[in-house]
Each structure stands twice: as structure tokens, then as C-alpha cells.
Image: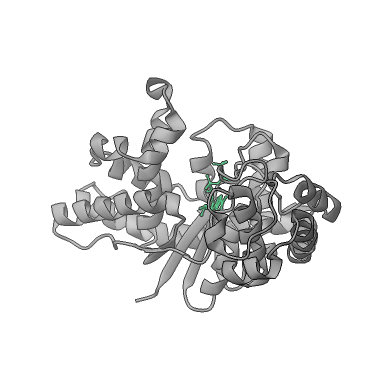
Amino acid sequence: MTQRILTGVQPTGSLHLGNYLGAIRNWRSFLDSHECLFFIVDLHAITLPQDPGELTASTRRAAAAYIASGMDPQKCSIFVQSHVPQHGELAWVLGCSTPLGWLNRMTQFKDKAGKQKDQASLGLLSYPVLMAADILLYKATHVPVGEDQKQHLELTRDIAQSFNSRFEKEVFIKPEPFIVESVARIMSLRDGTKKMSKSDPSEQSRIHLTDAPDVIYDKIKRAKTDMDLLPGTPEALENRPEARNLLEIFAALSGKTLKETCLHFEGCVFSKLKTELSDLLIAELSPIRLEMEKLEADHGYLDDLLQKGAQKAREIAGETLAEVYATLGFLKAK
Ligand code: AQP
């Protein structure tokens, strides 16, 4: 059976270094070994309010970021979630048999809904059901997930299992998580205890893939640090979240381990780390930024490519949905 990978990012703003190191950069390694479907999850994005104009621009920018980061459109399908209506259709079917208790346990819902649970939308609560539909529609065998999405993938497996058992048929494949252990969670440059995030109100908290070299230098220069010299071992980074974050970013970009990186900077002041880190970031991100600028200027090319990706996705998704509808006993449309 084809090993199929499905993964994506929400177009909720400009992609940042966390999205790149934690997700997109690792997707390249699947291109030659798996059938790859990379999508832009706009239906998920609207679980929180989005500005319409910004959403359109962010969707094209995400597609440009995928391609510029090495997702060769000849080797994978890139598409927008809302271009494939089967996502919403399957989500409804799965939602009809997913117990509310399962959804109420999801920690991301609790985090995002906060104390105002009654004010949170149905979409925010049922987000994991839509995610299950995304994955099960394509019979994805593997899904690269960050630590924060592990619980949602477990729910997807439970939903698949419960549907298959009820109808005594292997309609859905239970997907395996693909956790890239080597990649650390990239934290905010302003607060080493908070993850780097598109929705952080501070622009200084993150490096965008589109940041020019002078902006990168400036953000790294202003990144929060502490008063001590840099330590020689990872163990000594306990309670030094900002130092750990900058060293981990350096390690991820240089291909060194955190231990080797600590040794390299042992006893140094932060400014030395910041200079070397800025140089590394600029070398990695500049070609991506330049390629993104070219791609973003060509809406025709991007939109055509996304249409082709959606066409392929609709073929696979349509087959699965037809199988699901037949299993449920829905009268076949003429
Ligand atoms: N800081 C991070 N470090 C490592 N990985 C990260 N990812 C996101 N932030 C970091 C990974 O990027 C992928 C896509 O994320 P997403 O856009 O779908 O949603 P998210 O995780 O909620 O990302 P943001 O930036 O925090 O978006 P907002 O602010 O809109 O919620 C995922 O694989 C994620 O693990």
C-alpha cells in the first residue's frame, strides 16, 4: 500500500521560524519516500476570527512558503482545504458519532476557549473532528504532528476505530504519528516560556520567513536574554529558557546537537551567539524569502498550482466519501 503523508499549516498570519523548523523544513524528507499531500488549512483557521483580505493573502503566502521551502510541486500535491468540499462533509458524518465527552477532554480546546467556555464556538470544539476528517479522507498512513497535536491524532484513531467497528468494515486507516523528535519547540524571542506563534501580538517575538536581513539582525539583537555567560552543557540551561531557545535555534540551523552548540559557546556573552545566529538565519531564510517574493507576485501561477492540487485531492477524497456514504446506507445520487 502507498505510504501517504498529509500535513498542513493554518493561514492565520505569516509563517515563522517555529512553523519552519518545527514542521515545513521536515516535510522535504518525505518527498522521495511517500505520496505527499500538503494543504493549507483555511477551514481550521476560521475557528478564530480572521480578516478576509488577510486570509486570502496568507493562504497564497503559505503556498509560496511551501514551494520556496523545497516542496517541489512535481513531487507532491499542494492544495487549499476549502477547495475540497469533502472535508466539511466527512466532518459532519464523523461529528454525528463522536461523543461530546471526547471533545471536552481536548486540552487545546480548553486552552483556546479559556474561562469563557460557553462563549467559545462550536467550530473550536469540533476542530479535532474536522482534523480527523482531513486525515481519514485521504487514508493517510502517517501524519507528522507536533507534541501539541498528538492528542488530536489519538482522537482521529479512536474515531476511525469506532466507525470501522460499528460497520464491521475497514473503511478508515488508523494513522500513525510521525513525531520529529530532533526538533525542539521554538519559543518566543520575547519570552522563552511561550511558544513562537503567529498570533502573538508582538512582531518582535518571532522571525517571519519573509523578514529581510536587517529585520532578522534587529529581532535577534533585541531578543530577551539573562545576565549570565553561556553555559557549556545543556543541563546548565535549566531555568534559562531564553538562553536555551537561542541555542536550540542555533543547533537546529547548524545541524549540531545542543550539546555541541553549548560547547561551542561555552563562557561566551550573548552578543557572540546572537551575531552567529543572525548570520545562520539569514543564510537559511534569504533564499526562501526571495523565492516567496517571486511566487507571491505571480498569483496566476500559484492559483493554477493550487487548483491542480485540489483536483487530485478531490479525486481521492471523493472516493473515500462515496465509500462512507455507501456504508452509512445513503441513497446514491444519480
Ligand atoms: N513555535 C513552534 N515551534 C515548533 N513548531 C511549531 N509549529 C507552530 N509553532 C511552532 C508547528 O507548525 C505547524 C503548523 O502550525 P499551525 O499554523 O497549524 O498552528 P499552530 O501550531 O497553532 O501555529 P501558530 O503559529 O501558533 O499559529 P496560531 O498563532 O494561529 O495558533 C504545526 O506542526 C506546529 O506544531
Residue 49 appears left or right of 297:
left
Q: Is residue 94 above or below residue 70?
A: above
Q: In this view, does 235 lie above or below 211?
A: below
Residue 334 visible, this angle:
no
- Locate residue 220, reporting x and y percent: 76, 50
- Specify the quadrant of the image occupied by residue 321: bottom left
Q: Nearer the viewer, residue 174 or 235?
A: 235
Identify which residue is drawn at 68% across, 65% down.
Answer: 266
Identify which residue is drawn at 60% across, 44% down.
Answer: 197
Q: Is residue 2 above or below residue 324?
A: below
Quarter of the picture containing the N terminus is: bottom left
- Locate residue 13, reporting x and y percent: 65, 42
Identify which residue is drawn at 71% across, 50% down.
Answer: 208
Q: Which of 131 and 15 is in front in this view?
A: 15
Q: Nearer the viewer, residue 167 or 3?
A: 3
- Specify the quadrant of the image occupied by residue 192: top right
- Locate residue 241, reporting x and y percent: 58, 49
- Locate residue 7, reporting x and y percent: 49, 58
Residue 161 visible, this angle:
yes
- Specify the quadrant of the image occupied by residue 119: top left
Residue 31 appears left or right of 213:
left
Q: Which residue lies furthest to the right in this view?
A: 214
Q: Which of 77 and 85 is in front in this view?
A: 77
Q: Is residue 115 above or below residue 95?
A: above
